[in-house]
Amino acid sequence: MGKLLVIGDLHGNTGHALALLREAKKQGCDRIFAVGDFGAWEHVPSGRRYFEVVNKAARREGVRVYFLDGNHDKTSLIHELYDEKRDDEGFLTCRSHIRYAPRGHRWTWDDTRFAAFGGAYSVDKQRRLDWEAQRAAKPNERRRYGTSRERVTAGSLWFPEEQMTDAELDALLEADSSPADILFTHDKPRDSHPDFNRKKHPDCLPNQARIQRVVETLHPAVLFHGHLHYRYTDQIWSGEGKPTRVEGLAADPDASPRSDYHRDDSWYLLPLPYSRETAGIPLAAR
């Protein structure tokens, strides 16, 4: 028997990450899985420091941290840096105690079949592009006064690879469409209906439809996701008369917009092995 701490968006919040590592140790977990927006920003010094601090704390607590990508993670750089550094389970080894699950990744822990499909649409895409443009203009202004320093800003705040394409999903499901017990995603599936939903913009819907397609193909008993920064539970139907329970997790305190936020809403304790027979029963009482 084992336990896995599933956690919501971190956004590079070091204090929150360290608190959840302590929680994992308290709960007897030797693994954490983060459902996107982890804080994979190694193109900037603060992002590299974040990885080092989290890795050091994870090593100290005896916990290994796994994550999939959200729309605020620079996935292209993760692959550039770590694609050739895979562990025995196929995860990309970012640090000794930090692992990345690429889109479509499949693995088994404690006789439980897992799948991960990261990515989502950014509703603040234009604002982030505007910030990139403003940053790009600053070196041009300084060069008038004799400096020749230039700063590369494209792809520093908004990442073109932030969500799956239909072709990418086609290829992933063609490669492996076998059932999964637990599905980790960043985005919510189309058919889940939280009573607080920040992602209703029409441009959000295509990726939610892709996640729905994953559900209807893999028939998971439970799906965990982040992105909405809101804790809720719902049940949807994955086809063939099989229910999928959806567990949306809250984010770090700095990114949570509601006054009723509680840190405990950002994590979920998953006992392993997991069986569909218990799908209608809460996975853990807190």
Image (spheres, rainbow, N blue to C red):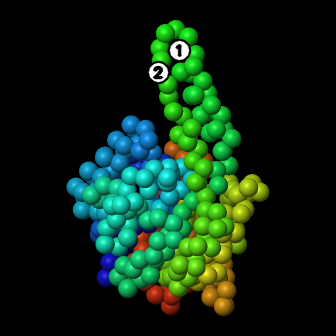
Residue shown at the point (38%, 66%) measured from the top left: 91
Residue shown at the point (52%, 74%) measured from the top left: 183
Looking at the rendering, in which quadrant would you find the C terminus? Answer: bottom left
Query: Looking at the picture, how far across and down is residue 43, in whole percent?
Result: 44, 41
Q: Is residue 213 left or right of residue 108?
A: right
Residue type at mark 2: give it. Answer: Arg
In the displayed structure, 249 sits above or below 170; it is above
Q: CA distance from mark 1 to mark 2?
A: 7 Å
In the displayed structure, 148 sits above or below 113; it is above
User: Depth check: 47 or 27 in front?
Assistant: 47
Residue shown at the point (42%, 74%) measured from the top left: 270
Quadrant of the rendered structure where residue 273 is?
bottom left
- Count the marks: how many? 2
In the displayed structure, 20 sits above or below 192; it is above
Residue 280 is at least partly visible in this image: yes
Residue position marked by numbered label 1 in the rendering: 143
Mark seen at residue 114: none
User: Depth check: 137 or 235 in front?
Assistant: 137
Query: Looking at the picture, how far across and down is residue 70, in whole percent?
Result: 54, 56
